[in-house]
Image: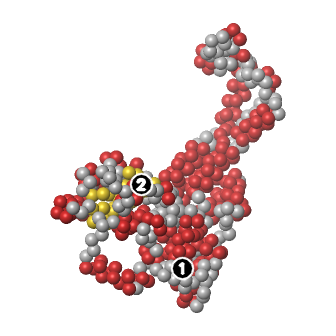
Amino acid sequence: MEPDLFTAAAEDRQEKDPSSSPLAVRMRPRVLDEVVGQQHLLRPGSPLRRLVGEGSGPAGPSSVILWGPPGTGKTTLAYVVSKATDKRFVELSAITAGVKEVRAVIDGARRASGGYGRETVLFLDEIHRFSKAQQDSLLPAVENRWVTLIAATTENPYFSIISPLLSRSLLLTLEPLTDEDVRALLRRALSEERGLGGAVGLPEDTESHLLRIAGGDARRALTALEASAGAAIDKGEQEVSLATLEETVDRAAVSYDRDGDQHYDVASALIKSIRGSDVDAALHYLARMIDAGEDPRFIARRLMISASEDIGLADPAALPLAVAAAQAVAMIGFPEAALTLSHATIALALAPKSNAATLAIGAALQDVKKGVAGQVPPHLRDGHYQGAAKLGHAQGYVYPHDVPGAIAAQQYLPEGVKDRRYYTPTRYGAEGRYADVVEKVRERLRGDTS
């Protein structure tokens, strides 16, 4: 980055007084080998390795788009590139920059390349906030490699970034940090001199709650650690107690272990509350799961199961709604995913309930497991291969669309179970329509037209 006098003075102050910078800034990795997580992007020969000057040959480094949730290291990776290379590094934020600023960077890059032979790396944060016209202004520079672009976004690039820019860049997807990744960062921050330098300790229960608060966001974890450590030091404590952490971040340590009994107990309570149509209880347990940092995809999967298990055909729209919610959650992530999960939970809790579909497949499976099955009736067997007709396969099959009402009087179940009735619809909600239809259909199948 090309600092002005004010930037240089600020950096000099930070070197003399590290505490003037936030802990999350002080603990940024200085080289790629210090980066925690994202190892799939840091293998030898990877685009990021080439950006910091590793590797040689006629193939130059590619522009990259870093896509991932907040706190997973997008800005950190750009910072490491800026420190590890002698290339000209310029940083812009799409929140404050416009076409004018982008063109100024591009003009400066062309002058630096032509006059001094220096390459320019442009880090553009929040690129999804750029309009189509603003993104278009980047195309000539990326196309001709006047700049090597590192763009960061938290939103799906296939929806927020124009196709020409995507095709000229490599899309690198950052994965959410695991608890182990964040734990390593916290312990590094506690011990290293540029961090807290061993000023306080972090007991296991406080660390566990801090990990829940972080939810895979390194910046959030380090910010909460700095605030609570400062409070502990002011109190004269040698360790950051759980009480101090709760007071500092105003967030109670809800009893919830994502890997233990509480995980399953609260998830069970959520589903049972939906089944019982208690929308307020369902929202309470949903909030506990969200607050504890539960994976939103896990919650969405449970809601999809609930839609079929407890609602079924009483509200045929319940399953499509739950599936749409799961797709939305996978695309947007927290915090906005909380709104989608609330939407789905309320709809499912207040929907009419029926477990007829659940009981139907259960009864059918029970027969099959007991061996109550029988052979497929000959007229239903495959008749497309040579010799099938000689075996009597597909002979006598009545094509339903050839008869009035498209229901042919013929046997579909095997002989041994031909009188079984697995599906018994309720009269709840939309399933009442199926209750009216199913007996009439069965009569037509038996040939009873009276």
Q: Which label number is shown at residue 358?
A: none
Image location (x, y in percent) of residue 265: 71, 60
Identify which amino acid the numbered label 1 is placed on.
Ser
Query: Residue 285 or 427: which is nearer the viewer?
Result: 285
- Which residue is located at x 72 percent, y 25 percent? 442
Image location (x, y in percent) of residue 400: 63, 18
Image quadrant of residue 262?
bottom right
Q: Quadrant of the C terminus?
A: top right
Q: CA distance from mark 2 to mark 1?
A: 32 Å
Q: What residue is shown with label 1? A: 191
Query: Residue 16 or 25: which is nearer the viewer?
Result: 16
Q: Is residue 227 in sight in this rendering? A: no
Identify which amino acid the numbered label 2 is placed on.
Gly
Q: Would residue 147 be found to the left or right of residue 46 on screen?
A: left
Q: Which label number is shown at residue 45?
A: 2
On screen, residue 317 above or below 395 = below
Image quadrant of residue 216?
bottom right
